[in-house]
Image (tube, grey):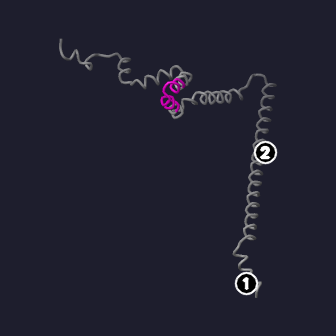
């Protein structure tokens, strides 16, 4: 038996075994949790909080930092909106329905634009009223400060005696 056959580096590993050796236990756990889905991440976090709270806190921070908590829902909603945008303007083959659909979509776009304009006017009116309230409060403070200023009272007394 030679010394090289006992050395671990001299053994030939399959690609999977090499991958597992290179990949650390935390990376393997992450890959396993990823393969199970978001529910597995949440379960691991809850168990971490129950048994060793710093582990649960670390998992929560990692999930938020790596965007694992929110990535799938956002990606699926973006995919759904792109799919809807592609199919919304495609012809159905029925000209009457296509005309109705085009008219309805145009009407909805007009309503959306008018609603957004209304919201903008509403924001401007609210901002203006808040600014007017601020200016009124400021002017009231200035007038009340001027009327109760002791320096003004002391300056007025010598003139009255003369």
Q: Residue furthest front?
A: 161
Q: Which residues lie in the magenta part?
A: 46-60
Residue 118: image tag: 2
Taking the image as shown, residue 24 lies to the left or right of residue 121, namely left
The local crowd at label 1, few if under 14, some if 14 to 19, many if 20 or more residues have their Cα within 10 Å, is few
Residue at 72% over, 68% down: 145
Of labels 2 and 1, earlier in sequence is 2
The percent coordinates of residue 150 (x first, y second) are 70, 73
The percent coordinates of residue 113 (x first, y second) are 76, 41
**Magenta span has 50?**
yes
Which quadrant holds the N terminus? top left
**Magenta span has 135?**
no
Determine the secondary structure under disc 2. helix
Determine the secondary structure under disc 1. helix
Q: Main secondary structure of the magenta part?
A: helix
Badge 1 is on which residue? Answer: 158
Quarter residue 99 falls in? top right
Taking the image as shown, residue 86 lies to the left or right of residue 144, namely left
Q: Is residue 127 above or below residue 63?
A: below
Q: Nearer the viewer, mark 2 or mark 1?
A: 1
Taking the image as shown, residue 15 lies to the left or right of residue 69, namely left
Which quadrant holds the C terminus? bottom right
Q: Residue furthest bottom?
A: 162
The percent coordinates of residue 6 (x first, y second) are 23, 15
18 or 155: nearer the viewer = 155
Residue at 42% over, 26% down: 26
């Amino acid at each position: 038996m030679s010394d090289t056959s006992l050395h671990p580096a001299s053994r030939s590993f399959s690609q999977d075994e090499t991958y597992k050796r290179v990949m650390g236990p935390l990376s393997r756990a992450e890959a396993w949790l990823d393969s199970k889905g978001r529910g597995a991440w949440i379960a691991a976090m809850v168990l971490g909080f129950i048994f060793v709270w710093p582990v649960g806190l670390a998992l929560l921070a990692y999930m938020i930092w790596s965007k694992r908590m929110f990535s799938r829902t956002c990606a699926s909603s973006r995919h759904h909106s792109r799919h809807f945008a592609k199919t919304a303007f495609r012809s159905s083959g029925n000209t009457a329905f296509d005309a109705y659909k085009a008219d309805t979509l145009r009407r909805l776009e007009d309503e959306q634009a008018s609603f957004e304009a209304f919201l903008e006017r509403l924001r401007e009116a609210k901002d203006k009223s808040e600014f007017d309230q601020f200016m009124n409060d400021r002017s009231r403070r200035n007038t009340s400060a001027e009327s109760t200023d002791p320096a003004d009272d002391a300056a007025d007394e010598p003139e009255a005696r003369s």
